[in-house]
Image (cartoon, rainbow, N blue to C red):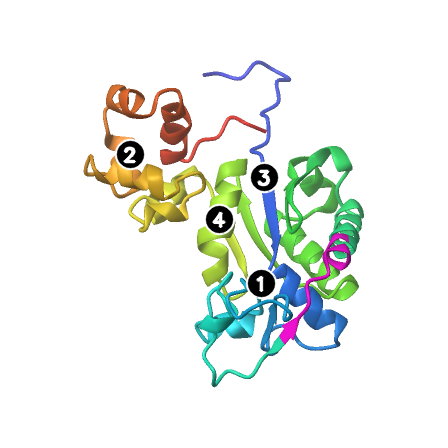
Amino acid sequence: MSMVKGESIMPERQYLCIDQKSFYATVECVARGLDPMKTNLVVADPERSENTICLAVSPSMKALGVKNRCRIKDIPSHIKHIVAQPRMQLYIDCAAEIYAVFLKYIAPEDIHVYSIDESFLDVTNYLKMYGMSAKELAVMIIKDVKDTVGTICTCGIGTNLYLAKIALDIKAKHAVDFIGVLDEESYRAELWDHKPITDFWQIADGKATRLRNHGITTMREVAMMDEDYLYDWFGIDAELLIDHAWGRESTT
């Protein structure tokens, strides 16, 4: 389609999805002056039984194979670790400090707080002002959070909210710098055959089982499936599933 003289092309949107790595455990390490990447710590109420679920485990514990939200009794006896009493107000205060760092760079109307430790930032209109790419801006914000608050960020960067979330959940955790980047093309090239399909946002065990019963185990297979069948199986929810299979997301 030809351009009308004076018509401008809308910039491709860029979103950051910033998450705090092992948030509660990291906050407890920082409060004790300990390195969260090297300290074995779990957040759990020590006054309860050994069946108590750990609200968080530090990155070093995860590296030793300890699962997040495990029970205290499931931690191998040879792993020496600190058990930190949960302090929810401390975590809320820390989350507010992190939000204040975001506000140094991004206006509140372009920030969506998704949970206590995860936020979406629409940085589309800031990149030209800062003279940076989305990744360069992400690196700057992440460094500021580390310097100011002490917590460790992971970040997904995407051309829509869904891709930013998937870049965070699937790619960032395996990246040396804890940053993952996706657009629709790279999503299909890199993740269409990714398993398990439950790693994708909004696909829990129940939906995955229903898909598997129809021979579908990847997002590529969802995208290739006749849409009429998907609507028969999932109703209106199929619309979201189909969009996400192609890496599309209309919500801004």
The mark nearer the N terminus, 1 or 4, is 1
Range of the magenta residues?
Answer: 83-92
Q: Nearer the viewer, residue 245 or 40?
A: 40
Q: Residue at x 62, y 50 (%)?
A: 18
Horizontal side of 15 relative to 109 (left or right) equals left
Q: Which amino acid type is shown beneath numbered disc 2?
A: Val
Q: Are marks 3 and 1 in contact (CB under 8 Å)?
A: no
Horizontal side of 15 relative to 190 (left or right) equals right
Query: Helix, strand or loop at disc 3?
Result: loop
Q: Residue 222: which numbered mark, if any?
A: 2
Q: Which amino acid type is shown beneath numbered disc 1?
A: Ala
Q: Which amino acid type is shown beneath numbered disc 4?
A: Ala
The mark nearer the N terminus, 3 or 4, is 3
Residue 89: within the magenta?
yes
Residue on which disc 1 sits: 56
Query: Helix, strand or loop at disc 4?
Result: helix
Q: Nearer the viewer, mark 2 or mark 3?
A: 2
Q: Are marks 3 and 4 in contact (CB under 8 Å)?
A: no
Q: Nearer the viewer, residue 228 or 161?
A: 228
Q: Nearer the viewer, mark 2 or mark 1?
A: 1
Q: Are marks 1 and 4 in contact (CB under 8 Å)?
A: no
Q: Which quadrant of the rendered structure holds the C terminus? A: top right
Q: Nearer the viewer, mark 3 or mark 1?
A: 1
Query: Helix, strand or loop at disc 1?
Result: strand
Alpha-carbon neighbours of circle 3 within 10 Å: few (<14), some, or many (≥20)? Answer: many
Q: Which quadrant of the rendered structure holds the N terminus? A: top left
Residue 204, position as x, y percentages in the image: 39, 42
The mark nearer the N terminus, 2 or 1, is 1
Residue 25, position as x, y percentages in the image: 63, 66
